[in-house]
Image (tube, rainbow, N blue to C red):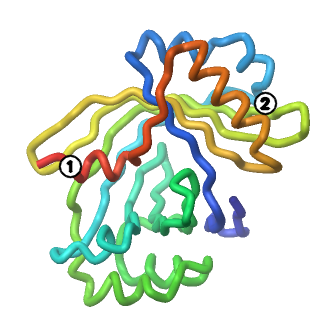
Amino acid sequence: MMNDTEGNVMGIELEYKLRVADEKTLAAILVDPELAALREGDWQEQRMKTTYYDSPDRRFSSELWTFRHRIEGDKSVVCVKTPTEDFHTRCEYQVERDGVDLDSIEALLLTGAPKKLVFLYGAGDVAPICGAEFSRKSCMLRFADGSRAELAGDCGVLHGETERIEFTELELELYEGKPDKMLELVDTLKTRYSLREQPLSKFARAMKLK
């Protein structure tokens, strides 16, 4: 991922999501000695509130795009993600803005978001369709080869208009260098804590709710 001087982000996101049985198991993972040895810097804890947007005719989701507004602690971020051939990776573009409007669309285009975003946004008929509210505890990991990844434990709820489901999961996202060491850690954690990969994003799961 790349950042510019205004906090805008653009680039390829390589991320693995792992299902965690419950909060107790997540707490045990986060104090794992192997992770402690890799940790760089302090733990960060934040409340996250994400609202996903689409048009009435589902222009974004039909193209497998994700369009969201997220409150991350004291930051307000608008983000669009576009698919690649590998479901573990997405092209991600985000800007710090107060909400979804033409200003945020123009700012996303300046980060390199595809011009198709203008068509998908249309005349501004997009509206909230589902969302997520969760607590995140995260830290940066630095591996022996110099690569870095963010480790995040998430616990909260996904919601549609009326339905809500709880979730607990672990995310590892590559920030710098080659993915080899991060992938080795993913395999280690899956074996050690009987974790399974979560193939669906938060958005995809929330979209299934009424």
Mark 1 nearby-residue class (10 Å; few <14, some 14–19, many ≥20)? few
* Residue at horizontal 41 percent and vertical 54 percent from the top: 70
Mark 2 nearby-residue class (10 Å; few <14, some 14–19, many ≥20)? some
- Residue 43 is left or right of residue 81, and the answer is right
Q: Which of 110 and 144 is in front in this view?
A: 144
* Residue at horizontal 36 percent and vertical 74 percent from the top: 63
Q: Mark 1 points at which residue?
A: 208
- Residue 145 is left or right of residue 138, and the answer is right
Above or below, 164 relative to 71: above
* Residue at horizontal 70 percent and vertical 63 percent from the top: 3
Residue 175, given in percent of the width and then of the height, sits at 72, 49
Helix, strand or loop at label 2? It is: strand
Helix, strand or loop at label 1? It is: loop
Question: Type of residue at label 2?
Answer: Glu
Q: Mark 2 points at which residue?
A: 40
Q: Nearer the viewer, residue 161 or 4?
A: 161
Question: Type of residue at label 1?
Answer: Lys
